[in-house]
Image (tube, coloured by chain):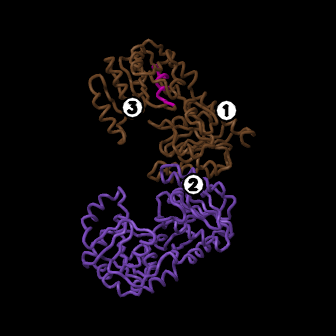
Chain colours: A brown, B purple
Amino acid sequence: MRIAQISTPHIPTPPAGYGACELVAGHLVEGLARRGHEVVLFGAAGSRAPATDLRVFDRAAEPAHFDHRELVHVALALRAAGSFDLIHNHCLTAGPALAGLVDRPCLTTLHCVHPIVRAFPEHPYVAVSESQRRLQPGLRFAGVVHNAVDLRAHTYQPVKGDYLLFLGRFHPNKGAHLAIEVARRLGTRLVIAAPKPHPDQEQYFEEQIRPGLGGAIEWVGPVEGAAKDRLLGGARCVVLPICWDEPFGLVYLEAMASGTPVVTFNRGAAPEIVVDGQTGYLVDSLEEMVAAVARAAGLRPAACRQRVEAEFGVDRMVEGYLAVYNRLLAPSSRGA
Amino acid sequence: MRIAQISTPHIPTPPAGYGACELVAGHLVEGLARRGHEVVLFGAAGSRAPATDLRVFDRAAEPAHFDHRELVHVALALRAAGSFDLIHNHCLTAGPALAGLVDRPCLTTLHCVHPIVRAFPEHPYVAVSESQRRLQPGLRFAGVVHNAVDLRAHTYQPVKGDYLLFLGRFHPNKGAHLAIEVARRLGTRLVIAAPKPHPDQEQYFEEQIRPGLGGAIEWVGPVEGAAKDRLLGGARCVVLPICWDEPFGLVYLEAMASGTPVVTFNRGAAPEIVVDGQTGYLVDSLEEMVAAVARAAGLRPAACRQRVEAEFGVDRMVEGYLAVYNRLLAPSSRGA
């Protein structure tokens, strides 16, 4: 199969550090190429695409606006549409709009939900969780494929330290303020790994985060690479008090791949990822979260790792996407 | 010829009040239909398209962002591309990007210059002035067609009042602060017709406009329709101290169609519109502008009106566009 993977023009695929969408797209490109498919990766400068053809549009790097970069990138990529059997798009703001202008099957992974996708409900989307699909009843879904992690990139650490870990961004939806409250109530050490707040979140940070920092509550800035791997593997548990229905959180997989359980609210994709009582706890209130974190040291690190090996490896994701591709290319689907 | 006119999804075509692009597109649609061409107008809800087919996409009205509305609107319009001989686009942010995905000739009038057009330099643009074309040497131009006004919509008023008029927006580029200075030096009455400043221009307004208001300098808010017609026609002259190379200003035509001369800086499209010493004055400094405004009452109102009748009527614009269409459809051009 000759497949176009339109990753983003923002961050190299795969990314050196942050970049969830580009990381997942990178795994997919590599996995498809390994299976003998002919893959063309459309990505940002600095992308690496072993065994595949890489196309970078300098013009797509120029516009100042995020959405304009995507529009230029996708528009230029789709000019070659005729040479592909299938086009897999990862740019939310432009792909669904432009797909209707080319005569090849085109699908988009819903890495996040951008309002513009609602204007193109007939485009085939791939949800990254059953939860995401349920929450977007107006869209046509070609399938659900969970995200994956490369297990080789995450060191299994069976011996744990004395700290809880929050890893993410400072945004009310991510719940760092609740992680602080949990640690405070337990009198436990909490490491917060997060970049400086976005300007939009300055007020949230000043009011709900900064007063709680100090003593046992330590903000270490952003972490990537080996430092992130060590921090994830050494935590007693990762605390993710999400305050929204997060469609998928790669950090769940990264924690579990390191042998670290995840304590989180029972919403969004969390119950599809965490096995309650085995690889973490799914709770419904802050009180339950405090109690669950206290119990988390009793969970087996091996169970966490095994869960990711069994369900969230790259091979499984690649097979999931190939099944979607084949359904989309089946004669009955193409006529629909 | 079967022609698609993709006007904007923002304001009805033609507009009830403000909307230069939609006004020009409306004149073009009507003029083409009158000549027997089959025209389909893609516009905002509320558009009127006598003798043509009107298509409105409700989905294009939903996105909050200006550029997303254009993307939805143009993407849906271009799905019907195959049924047209030619597609004339007026949406800058989406049209040039998407045109490369359809197999019909498509061109875009450069109503303004948006940075994203530089990513699609090979798209055929129509400049609204020679000045605009000269200032964008990197773009491919299919032609230059000046904007036009409907002379029936502007009352010729040979008898003038005692005031100068500035009509436009509060933006440093438009130069209302300099119009105030000119009036102050001459001790003459100045009427400023402009909407409230955009939030981005609050500081400019507070620092450079508000201190000058009062007495003989009167800000009357925005004007449209009959009030605008009376105000333009009754002015001794319209003062437009533009501080940028404005690609085209419809207000120049509206003033002259009312028999009112225009005093402006000799830059942008101004020298293509105003005949120096006949329909206004083209000056190079504030001192020259003061002197020119003092002399403007000596210009003949009839010369102003005749200039617009001869060069800037709707028929002339429609013929200009038809010439561009025919060049673009000529076999040699299509193969290029």
> Which residue: 46% across, 13% down?
A299
Reply yes or no: does residue A252 show up in magenta. Answer: yes
Q: Dividing the image into 4 quarters, which one contains the N terminus of chain B?
A: bottom right
Instruction: Determine which of the numbered discs, if any, sits on residue B73 in the image.
Output: 2
Q: Quadrant of residue B187?
A: bottom left
Output the chain of dot 2.
Answer: B
For the stretch drawn in magenta, the main secondary structure is helix
Output the chain of dot 1.
Answer: A
**Label 3 neighbour load within 10 Å: few <14, some 14-19, many 20+:** some
Assign a secondary structure to mark 3. Answer: loop
Reply yes or no: does residue A313 show up in magenta. Answer: no
From the image, tell me which residue sits under label 1: A323
- On the image, the x and y values in percent for residue B51 come to 65, 68
User: Mark 2 vs mark 3: same chain?
Assistant: no
Output the chain of dot 3.
Answer: A
Q: Quadrant of residue B191?
A: bottom left
Q: Is residue B59 left or right of residue B17?
A: right
Nearer the observer: mark 2 or 1; the answer is 2
Assign a secondary structure to mark 1. Answer: helix
> In this picture, which residue range is highlighted in magenta?
A248-260
Task: Tell me if I can see residue B70 in this picture.
Answer: yes
**A44 or B297, which is in the foreground?**
B297
**Label 2 neighbour load within 10 Å: few <14, some 14-19, many 20+:** many
Task: Tell me if I can see residue B140 in this picture.
Answer: no
- On the image, the x and y values in percent for residue A215 come to 26, 23
Q: Quadrant of residue B268?
A: bottom left
From the image, tell me which residue sits under label 3: A223
The disc labelled 2 sits on which kind of residue?
A: His
User: Mark 3 vs mark 1: same chain?
Assistant: yes
Assign a secondary structure to mark 2. Answer: helix
- On the image, the x and y values in percent for residue A40 come to 61, 43
Is the Cβ of the residue at disc 2 closer than 8 Å to that at disc 1?
Answer: no
